[in-house]
Amino acid sequence: MNACVLYDKRDMRLEDRSQPELGDLDVRIAIKVAGICGSDLHYYQHGKVAAFSLKEPLVLGHEACGEIVEVGKNSTLTPGDRVVINPGLVCGNCKYCLRGQENLCRDIKFMGSASYFPHIQGTFQETVVVQERQCHIVRNDTAYQVLAFAEPLSVALHAVHRAGNLFDQRVLIIGSGAIGLLVASLARLSGAAFVAITDILDYPLQVAQKLGVDECVNAQHDTEVMASWQQEPNSFQIVIEATGTYKGFEAALSCASPGGKVVEVGILPGGQSEIPFSHAFAKELDILFVLRQNLQFGPALDMLAQGKLDPLPLLSASFALPDFEQAFALARDKSKAIKVQLEP
């Protein structure tokens, strides 16, 4: 089978790989659509994400769906079933799993990530083998391009749940990438009184306008608006930071209202940074962090399968697997793309 294998930063190759054998409770899935995530781009460009560095060749990708083509002898699933893959395989027995914090499992095996060694291979390949419990069956004919948004939507949904009740609140999202735009859509569905979003590029803000966001602001050009948001009458009870930059995190602290919440869903870089936490102290802010998703995969998939949220305005392009270089080039250009998908 064909697979996109990352050997080092900016060194990805299309290879013919053998298909692994099935365990008793495994299933083999023919991948129909796999989305390129920001973490995939980090691995491709830098060979690492945060503290996780590439230690061996790795197939990236974790936002995927497809069709079961083979099952292990004890599996209850059936070839032909349409499934979405939950890329995080948790142990189910540790104290975090047992108290409903599966995303904090210390033994989680996450597909397409260097956080575990040997690395767990990802979904940028024609077929993958996963455990049955990672499969979410889809009973209707929802398009695969829609279903592939389940994992990023689950992260956005977890971020919104961490933020608490958004009803009748002023909500600001910093960063209008895929996660930021999904958070904005969820904020509108949650009954927020006012939803604003920022970015430093115009294209994603144009997409945000199509989604019905109340105010879309270019943080580099609309400095007066940004300054006004730092004043108490115009500040926000809830700020969700989705750029994964210290500059964005600092802006979140500045724009949050006294007694408000700042939720960091972006992956901040490693190393030290001087953050003016005096903003947070003076306003007694709650600062919350988000790691992947926690028990939100099923609810996110239900939203997509039931048509409660349409993610396709975020889909910029789709490419065949051999065209992965063009796909990654476009995905890296945030002035032209939000979400790019591969179709093995």
Image (tube, rainbow, N blue to C red):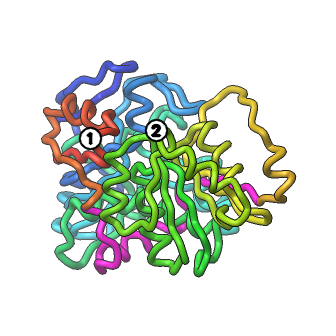
18 lies above or below 142? above
Q: Which residue is mark 2?
A: 113
Name which residue lies at 45% across and 41% down: 200
The residue that appears at 31% across and 39% down in the rendered structure is 335
Q: Which residue is mark 1?
A: 336
Residue 69 painted magenta: no
| Camera-side residue of 195 and 154 | 195
State the SS at label 1: loop
Numbered tag placed on residue 262 in the rendering? none
Instruction: In the rendered view, tell whether residue 335 sits above or below residue 309.
Output: above
Give the amino acid at mark 2: Ser
Q: Position of residue 142 (x, y in %)?
A: 21, 72
Quadrant the C terminus occupies: top left
Specify which label sits upstream in the sequence, 1 or 2.
Answer: 2
Q: Calculate the distance from the C-alpha at mark 1 to the C-alpha at mark 2.
A: 26 Å
Q: At which x and y percent is residue 174?
A: 53, 51
Q: Is residue 187 left or right of residue 72?
A: right
Q: Residue at x 26, y 30 (%)?
A: 329
Along the line of sight, the residue nearer the viewer: 40 or 253: 253
What amino acid type is highlighted by mark number 1?
Answer: Lys
Q: Secondary structure at mark 2?
A: loop
Say which residue appears at 64% left-offset and 46% top-offset: 251
